[in-house]
Amino acid sequence: MKKNLSIKKVLIANRGEIALRVIRACKQLGISTVAVYSTADEKSLHVKLADEAVCIGPPQSKLSYLNIQSILSAADITGADAIHPGYGFLSENAEFARLCRECNITFIGPTPENIVAMGEKTRARKIAKEAGVPLLAGTLDPVSGVEGAVEAAEKIGYPVILKAAAGGGGRGIHIVRNSKQIRENFGRMTAEAGAAFGNPAMYVEKFCENPRHVEIQVLCDKYGQRLFLGERDCTIQRRHQKLIEEAPSPVVTPELRNRMGRAAIALCEAVKYESVGTVEFLVDRNRNFFFMEMNTRIQVEHPVTEMVTGVDLIQQQIMVAAGMKLTLKQSDIQIASHAIECRINAEDPVTFAPSPGLITALHVPGGYGVRNDSFVYDQYRVVPFYDSMIGKLIVHAEDREAAILKMRQALDEYIVEGIKTNIPLHKKVLAAKAFSAAEYDTHFLEEFLSKSE
């Protein structure tokens, strides 16, 4: 599909599988691509497949993939008129988006104003409340010190969660069950938040017992057309890091999907959102849902939505950034199949310690309805400097039972030698009765692992 777009050359300010994903989408739209890479990634596949490649620094992220000056310089010398940030790194950096705008470079993502509005969690909660989106009880402003946190927690009722106001990606979250835990750990929590996010502020929120993590994919253009593309269930996670995602959620009814989707759209309308994004919710046992946060970027798990809707989210994201109107309507979004994604990480499946090194043999699964988004190859050396994810295995089938069977078969075919991966863990989870019955919550994996020891 080749479009007559205003964007002619895209620099991908990222690495790994998402960089490859964007390169492929661009080529299908007739757009030239520029890869950037650190010296550690010189032999990475995205460097080989892009039309041009520019080294932007040494392995350390802050000197390469987080180096705004180097990335903008690379765009300038290659004549790139747009930048796609992928996910992670600079994807939700409002200053980066603003500088792209000042340099007349199209930022393929939401506006800087969108990112600011949703990036600070207490501000996002205020906007959500005003938009009528359901919230858990909690503070709408950061707490003023440890005693302010204790006072708020006691008013809300334990257990509560102390969250970093500038946090995200499952980080900066602390469950506390009494005032002693707050007083003993508040200083450490704020110090960690300051170091990780550049902002030590914390807020307090009621802890939702035994929830599921369900998120709504949104797609919005610059002309007020806003769609939701169903939900993804991301409940299987470890330490707030997602491991397995699926679409649709096995606990979401059509009626609940519509209500959650409409809530997500109300939030988007409140900030005049543009681009793709994800509104994340907790869903309790009674199918009540509560706003957590909005991620103003493409998500790691976007392929499962693509598989069940038939919508290429990266291409749509690029076309929206180029100023095109959405041709899709809400009625076009029909979900009558099932997709599951397993994140394949280079790590010990028991200790979860990273496992960088040389891949000495590789066989990836295939067949109808099997998709492997990865950047590694036989004899590729996995470097120790970045996230341990080396790929995403996605399957698509007519229903959830068939998708589970297909994923189990695909995992059996997946061979990676020379390093350790979490494929054995995925096999155990997919074989668990609780997973097949969809009877689990966000604490499932820790409990499952403790029973397996």
Image: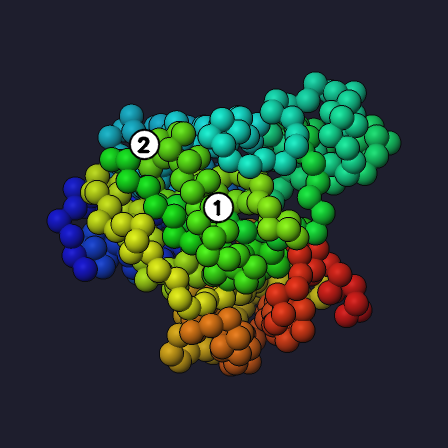
Mark 2 residue element: helix
Residue at far left of view: 4
Crowd around label 2: few <14 · some 14–19 · many ≥20 (10 Å) = many
Question: Which residue sits at x=78%, y=36%?
Answer: 158
- The kind of residue tagged 2 is Cys
Residue 433: horizontal and vertical position, in percent? 67, 73
**Figure quadrant of residue 76:** top left
Which residue position is annotated with label 1?
260
Please give left or right for residue 315 compared with residue 68 in the image.
left
Residue 334: horizontal and vertical position, in percent? 35, 60
Front residue of 329 and 39? 329
Crowd around label 1: few <14 · some 14–19 · many ≥20 (10 Å) = many
Q: Image height check: is 369 above or below 185?
A: below
Q: Image height check: is 168 above or below 14?
A: above
Question: Which residue sits at x=46%, y=40%?
Answer: 263
Label 2 to label 1: alpha-carbon separation: 33 Å
Which residue position is annotated with label 2?
100
Mark 1 residue element: helix
Residue at far right of view: 180
Please give left or right for residue 240 compared with residue 359 in the image.
right
| Number of numbered markers | 2
Query: Is residue 14 shown to the viewer in this render?
Result: no
Residue at far front of view: 255
Question: Which residue sits at x=54%, y=51%?
Answer: 214
Of badges 2 and 1, the one in the foreground is 1
- The kind of residue tagged 1 is Met
Labels 2 and 1 touching (C-beta < 8 A): no
